[in-house]
Image (cartoon, rainbow, N blue to C red):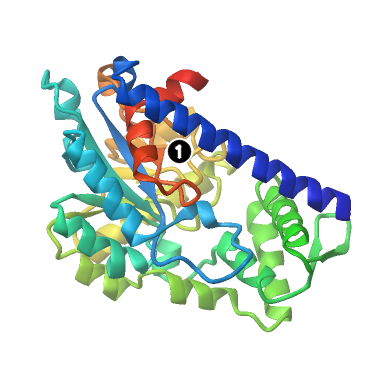
């Protein structure tokens, strides 16, 4: 068990070193104007949290967390590269436009409160539109966020009891390596087993340890009244992101459609405008499949985004329900990395 935890930590450090090295190389290549076609027409950037750096030693969700200073540096870096900041709904026109100026869109997933308290002012300062993809179960306070629950739980305990399907098992969480191992095991189970059932099991363990998982949703995400106030800001738009943030490609037809339609309907009821954009939960094979794309089209969604990395190409104009996005990742908060990513070179080099 201890050896496995150490190996998890070593693999993580190695992965980060490889990615950092690739970004450094891409930054140098971009500065020489190489691989110019990789940039495409523009890019959609993904964010989650925008807030000052946390103080916990164990931060398994660090990749979802960027500082306000980094967001501002990223916007400045893109502006200096000649990028126009546009709304998602303007993408079809810009993909068809023969203009040589690249464009950037900013998106934020899950509706965190820091999007309003930190990010909104930065976007306003530079006139940059942004879309927040909302889960109606979060702003409606009916669902929990398992990755936030697990993060908070492991930061307050030295062991977790969890049932992986073979009976209750105790996972030690005394050291950062053990905590990471426990986080990875539980996350892997949630992403492969019945997600609703697995999350319910985690919530029960949190409650057993006197930690309310619904409380962290209240603490971290915007409530309906706050979203209504924020919607008055001219630069913000809302898009759907399902009800509960489950991997919808793993759900039966009726349940998957209810997840999609439920978030669109709830946002329409809240704001009076039905969203035309959508972000697939997790943004990968757990949610992004042909069935989901067809469902979105039938429900009137024009633009849907994944977390597959890449830049936007003119040929994507034919179907905008599977667009790539580039993560502004909390583990790589350097302006030159933003320029490297926007260049498309890292994705060209890795295929």
Q: Residue at label 1?
A: 307
Count all numbered tags in the image, as a single digit. 1
- Where residue 114 sits: x, y (%)? 35, 67
Between 133 and 343, the one lying in front of the other is 343
Q: Position of residue 137 (x, y in %)?
A: 45, 64
Instruction: Name which residue lies at 53% across and 56% down.
Output: 62
Q: Secondary structure at mark 1?
A: loop
x and y percentages locating residue 22 in the rendered image: 50, 30
Left or right: where 204 falls relative to 282: right
Q: Which of the pair 296/77 is nearer the observer?
A: 77
Can residue 298 be seen in this snapshot? Answer: no
Judge by depth and name the residue closer to the eye, 285 or 340. 340
Residue 319, image quadrant: top left
Which residue is at a point 58% across and 44% down the rendered structure image? Answer: 251
- Specify the farthest residue to the bottom: 210
Task: Tell me the quarter of the image containing the N terminus.
Answer: bottom right
Identify whether 51 is placed above or below 70.
Answer: below
Q: Residue 78, image x and y in percent?
A: 24, 39
Near-viewer residue (118 or 286): 118
- Residue shown at the point (65%, 47%) measured from the top left: 191
From this viewpoint, is residue 211 visible?
yes
- Corner quadrant of residue 33: top left
Query: Tag 1: Cα neighbours inside 10 Å, few (<14), some, or many (≥20)?
Result: many
Residue 10 location, quadrant: top right
- For residue 31, side relative to residue 196 (left or right): left
196 left or right of 261? Answer: right
Q: Residue at x 22, y 67 (%)?
A: 230
Q: Is residue 60 above or below residue 8?
A: below
């Amino acid at each position: 068990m201890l050896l496995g935890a150490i190996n998890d930590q070593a693999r993580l450090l190695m992965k980060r070193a490889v990615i950092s090295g690739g970004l450094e190389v891409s930054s140098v290549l971009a500065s020489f104007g190489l691989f110019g076609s990789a940039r495409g027409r523009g890019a959609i950037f993904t964010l989650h949290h925008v807030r000052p750096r946390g103080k916990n030693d164990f931060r398994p969700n660090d990749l979802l967390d960027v500082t306000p200073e980094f967001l501002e540096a990223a916007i400045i870096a893109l502006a200096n590269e000649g990028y126009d900041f546009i709304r998602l709904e303007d993408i079809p026109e810009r993909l068809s436009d023969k203009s040589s100026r690249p464009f950037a869109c900013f998106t934020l997933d899950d509706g965190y409160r820091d999007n309003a308290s930190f990010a909104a002012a930065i976007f306003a300062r530079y006139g940059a539109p942004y879309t927040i993809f909302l889960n109606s179960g979060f702003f409606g306070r009916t669902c929990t966020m398992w990755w936030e629950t697990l993060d908070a739980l492991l930061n307050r305990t030295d062991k977790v009891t969890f049932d992986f399907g073979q009976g209750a098992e105790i996972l030690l969480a005394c050291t950062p390596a053990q905590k990471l191992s426990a986080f990875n095991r539980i996350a892997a189970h949630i992403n492969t087993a019945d997600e609703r059932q697995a999350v319910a099991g985690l919530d029960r363990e949190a409650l057993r340890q006197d930690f309310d998982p619904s409380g962290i949703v209240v603490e971290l995400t915007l409530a309906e009244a706050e979203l209504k106030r924020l919607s008055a800001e001219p630069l913000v738009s809302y898009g759907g992101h399902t009800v509960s943030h489950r991997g919808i490609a793993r759900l039966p037809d009726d349940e998957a459609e209810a997840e999609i339609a439920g978030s669109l309907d709830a946002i329409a009821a809240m704001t009076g405008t039905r969203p035309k954009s959508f972000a697939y939960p997790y943004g990968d094979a757990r949610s992004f499949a042909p069935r989901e794309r067809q469902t979105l089209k039938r429900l009137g969604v024009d633009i849907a985004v994944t977390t597959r990395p890449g830049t936007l190409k003119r040929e994507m104009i034919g179907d905008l329900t599977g667009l790539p996005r580039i993560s502004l990742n909390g583990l790589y908060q350097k302006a030159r990395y933003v320029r490297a990513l926007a260049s498309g070179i890292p994705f060209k080099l890795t295929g």
